[in-house]
Image (cartoon, rainbow, N blue to C red):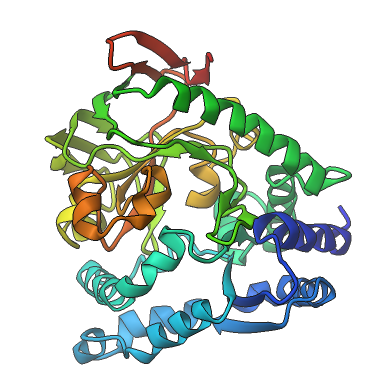
């Protein structure tokens, strides 16, 4: 594998497909030390595409962990408002967001779960007013991954660190189609394939979905005016962009108050620096009324206690078991990848683009239409070879969508 040649192709994919950079666009890039080589290549290509400016938002795992382990309690009380002021001013000045994600799946394993929940909630409250720029696609935004040593070794524990990093790069390039001769053309074809599923689902205007599988027997109603999406999104001026690289899902929003039954996660969830395994929920009238987990239950409790909407669903996504990411046979321990290997749901905030006219509604109108609102949006995976998903039209017609985990439409 020629890493440098693939980094050039990866940067091109991020800029031309992920962010669809146009002359005059500007970029906010969130990264850590592992992202610098890729960020430098992105900068060279972005300026060649007539981008006007790139600003970095740097983060570091060591600094993050030090805060949780050593900072005084008062350090978790508030986030200075100027951080949100800066990002909002940037978004209003034609800056778009790129997150270069190099995670450590269990960074906060030593940290106090109460501190994690407290700080996540404080940060979410401080950033609530700027969530709309990405959740409502007012700016272009995209997430792309690269290996950190900790992530690579967690995925390939049998390999030495350098070999694990190389192996993970190879799988990232495979999942994002960078290993193909023309990744941009391959993504254009992939977008067309996702659009066929989206068109089918939107034509049927399903009233509800029924999920059946081990530990899962769930009925999910969909709001009137729900819209299925998949692959590319658009900002108001018309630019398309790809929020997730990779992506294999088609998704919409469930009705926040009309979900009933049991739901069992089929893959571990990496969130808030911890790995959650054996996650299970019971829903009644759209709300989580009971939950359990084989590990990390304290983290899930903190998530659910964030606000009222955190106990309700904001996204339902369909992914076939034969997706390219699933075919790798890997558990990536990274939601960006694992959610695209499996059907999934998200607790918390729904996307306004999944509701007809949702971006033009105020909060009360969105809630009245069945759209969930929350400070969080956390995906968890429920797909598998034994999953069956059936759609029901308003006339009561049953339409099999996924059988044995795969699309049948």
Q: Is residue 191 above or below residue 99?
A: above
How many discs appear?
Answer: 0
Residue 155 horizontal side relative to residue 130, left or right:
right
> Which residue is more in the foreground, 260 or 255?
255
**Residue 11 x, y percent position in the rendering:** 76, 63
Name which quarter of the figure residue 2 lies in: bottom right
> Which residue is more in the foreground, 197 or 323?
197
> Which residue is more in the foreground, 403 or 105?
403
Q: Evaluate whether residue 351 shows in this view.
A: no
Residue in the picture at 44% in, 80% down? 88
Residue 100 horizontal side relative to residue 254, left or right:
right
Residue 150 horizontal side relative to residue 22, left or right:
left
Question: As drawn, which residue projects farthest toward the top?
Answer: 397
Q: Is residue 67 above or below residue 400?
A: below
Q: Is residue 189 above or below residue 320?
A: below
**Residue 12 x, y percent position in the rendering:** 79, 60
**Residue 380 x, y percent position in the rendering:** 37, 44
Name which quarter of the figure residue 166 lies in: bottom right
Q: Is residue 220 above or below residue 15?
A: above
Residue in the picture at 75% in, 58% down? 16
Q: Evaluate whether residue 39 shows in this view.
A: yes
**Residue 54 x, y percent position in the rendering:** 67, 82
């Amino acid at each position: 594998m020629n890493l440098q040649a693939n980094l050039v192709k990866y940067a091109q994919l991020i800029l031309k497909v992920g962010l669809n950079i146009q002359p005059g666009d500007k970029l906010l890039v969130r990264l850590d030390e592992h992202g610098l080589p890729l960020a430098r290549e992105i900068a060279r290509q972005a300026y060649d595409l007539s981008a006007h400016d790139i600003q970095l938002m740097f983060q570091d795992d060591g600094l993050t962990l030090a805060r949780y382990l050593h900072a005084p309690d008062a350090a978790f009380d508030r986030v200075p408002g100027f951080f949100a002021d800066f990002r909002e001013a940037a978004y209003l000045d034609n800056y778009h967001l790129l997150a270069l994600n190099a995670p450590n799946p269990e960074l906060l394993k030593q940290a106090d779960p109460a501190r994690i929940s407290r700080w996540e909630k404080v940060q979410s409250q401080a950033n609530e007013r700027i969530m709309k720029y990405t959740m409502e696609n007012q700016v272009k935004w995209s997430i792309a991954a690269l290996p950190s040593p900790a992530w690579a070794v967690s995925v390939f524990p049998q390999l030495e660190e350098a070999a694990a990093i190389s192996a993970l790069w190879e799988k990232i390039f495979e999942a994002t189609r960078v290993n193909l001769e023309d990744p941009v053309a391959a993504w254009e074809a992939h977008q067309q394939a996702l659009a066929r599923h989206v068109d089918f689902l939107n034509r049927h205007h399903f009233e509800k979905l029924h999920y059946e599988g081990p530990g899962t027997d769930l009925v999910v109603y969909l709001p009137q005016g729900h819209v299925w999406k998949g692959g590319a999104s658009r900002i108001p001026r018309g630019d398309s962009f790809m929020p997730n690289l990779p992506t294999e899902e088609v998704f919409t929003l469930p009705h926040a108050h009309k979900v009933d039954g049991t739901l069992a996660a089929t893959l571990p969830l990496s969130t808030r620096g911890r790995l959650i395994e054996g996650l299970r929920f019971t829903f009644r009238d759209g709300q989580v009324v009971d939950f359990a987990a084989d590990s990390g239950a304290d983290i899930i409790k903190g998530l659910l206690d964030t606000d009222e909407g955190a106990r309700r669903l904001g996204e339902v996504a369909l992914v076939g078991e034969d997706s390219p990411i699933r075919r790798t046979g890997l558990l990536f321990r990274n939601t960006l990848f694992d959610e695209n290997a499996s059907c999934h749901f998200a607790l918390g905030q729904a996307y306004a683009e999944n509701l007809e006219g949702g971006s033009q509604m105020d909060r009360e109108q969105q809630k009245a239409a069945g759209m969930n609102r929350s400070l969080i949006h956390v995906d968890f995976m429920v797909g598998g070879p034994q999953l069956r998903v059936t759609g029901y039209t308003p006339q009561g017609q049953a339409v099999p969508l996924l059988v044995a985990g795969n699309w049948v439409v």
